Image (spheres, rainbow, N blue to C red):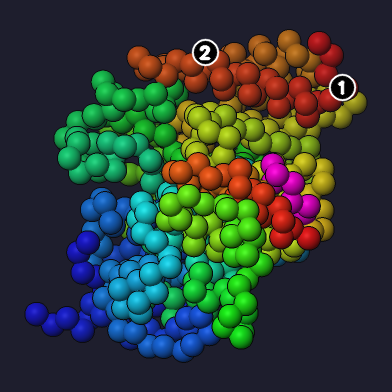
Amino acid sequence: MGTDVFRSEVPLTVNGSPCRPTVDHRSTLLDVLREQMGLTGAKKGCDHGQCGACTVLVDGRRANSCLLLAVAHEGCDITTVEGLHADDGVELHPVQRAFLERDAFQCGYCTPGQICSAVGALAEAAAGNASHVTDPDADTGEPVELTREEIRERLSGNLCRCGAYPHIVEAVEDVTP
Amino acid sequence: MKPFRYVRAYSVEEATTAHAGRANSRYLGGGTNLVDLMKLGVERPERLIDVSRLPLDAVEELPDGSVRAGATVRNSDLAAHPLVRERYPVLSRALLAGASGQLRNVATTGGNLLQRTRCPYFQDLGKPCNKREPGTGCGARDGVHRDHAVLGHSRLCIATHPSDMAVALAALDARVELQGVRGRRTLPVTEFHRLPGDRPDVDTEIEPGELITGVLLPAATAGLPSAYRKARDRASYAFALASVAVVLDIEDSVVRQARIAFGGLAHRPWRARHAERALQGGAPSDEAFRQAVDAELSAAEPLRDNSFKVRLARNLACDVLRRLAGPASAS
């Protein structure tokens, strides 16, 4: 069975490092990160884009890595929870620190996805992107203030079965400009 | 998942040529629905043609004042684009009412129109479904069908179209731009999706190998007062039980034209032509809105467990019409 037509080498940048994994076309970005690159921060929750545990940043934008075919992401810049820290490799990202300080988790399984999603959501609000709960008349393209209601709406794609939502919202509030 | 070949297209012609004569090919946009269906075994393509990098990622004004949104524009970018926010706010609001931030960052304009129903029987290979496998029956008709259609369904299929975006496009009189190996054409969004009839396996009028290249938003509906409202089981991140998009043109206390489209009620966005005709040329009032919407929904044929949708849709539509009419609407 000729397998080469079903596999491809995919140059990527993951957490700042260039790499060229050879992937089965069926592999999701999540599976390549976890099983070929040893980056087990992004979690496989539902594997259907419904829970957000697999959230990573693709070219700076948050996405469900369980629904992304790795082969389609040649040349993309991927950031997982393992790559959010400062360049010194020690200092945590402010969102990571806020999650620790607010105790914004119980079992922790959804946390890497929650954190990556929050980082993406903060950037979207700063870029002036409205959400479902933003007053339509105030949708001017100016940065959107992240109220609790805004945070809850913008993070609705990340489920937490422990129900740590109140502390998650507080953690994100702490890093809101 | 079955192994498949992967081809990345860099031009529309390359994409349609790669698809030609290969029935078991699928175009891959953001993949948020297709990849999921492949995992479920509902879709089993032998070849994916990746169209996500085609040069169709612009939202631009055309010389005639209309706006063209390319097929690969991501849902979040379409919602945030100034031309859409300012001229077609109902489209921004509909997009923001759908899915999650992560999904909207990935899902494309073309893919949104082509997404399949979320009917659980369609997604479950262990259940009968005439849409997935013609002739096997409809598990939903006598099964769990609270979320299903109340308008335009058939004996064979009661599925609904899940898109919020398409409902706003239907109310805006938008058109879908298609390109096949034999040429280019456009279709009104209202004629793009089909009712199930006796072919529930066919969702749209798209022909094999045809590619959506964009949607056209007409100058005629730019800047008109418009709004989208959606009712769902959760406050966020759920498909519509019922939704409504309204584009209302009132001048001197007379309804020049009301454009009303429902989501969550049918196999396609349901343009409420009866209600629109009833309102045209009349004075906007709560009573006129109620009568017009009731006239439209009198055609509803709810199933055992979803008659609540009819009243829900009626209340949503009346409320949005009232708000948009503002002080012009007397009670």
Extreme-left residue of the structure = A1
Residue occupying image coordinates x 35% and y 77%: A38
Instruction: Give whichever of B270, B82 is nearer the camera.
Output: B82
Quadrant of image for the N terminus of chain A: bottom left
Quadrant of image for the C terminus of chain A: bottom right
Secondary element under disc 2, as helix, strand or loop, is loop
Q: Could you tell me residue B142's position as x and y percent?
A: 26, 20
Q: Which residue is mark 2?
A: B298
Is residue A99 something that shows in the picture? yes
User: Eyeballing the image, is B269 above or below B300?
Assistant: below
Instruction: Give whichever of B301, B174 is nearer the camera.
Output: B301
Q: Could you tell me residue B117's position as x and y percent?
A: 38, 41
User: Eyeballing the image, is B280 above or below A108?
Assistant: above
Secondary element under disc 1, as helix, strand or loop, is helix
Relative horizontal placement of residue B215, taking residue A136 as reference (left or right): left
User: Eyeballing the image, is B142 above or below A46?
Assistant: above
Give the magenta part as a residue range: A144-150
Q: Chain of mark 2?
A: B
Dot 2 amino acid type: Ser
Q: Which residue is mark 1?
A: B328
Q: Chain of mark 1?
A: B
Dot placed on the residue nearer the N-terminal end, 1 or 2: 2
User: Is A147 in the magenta?
Assistant: yes
Dot 1 crowding, Cα within 10 Å, few <14, some 14–19, many 20+? some
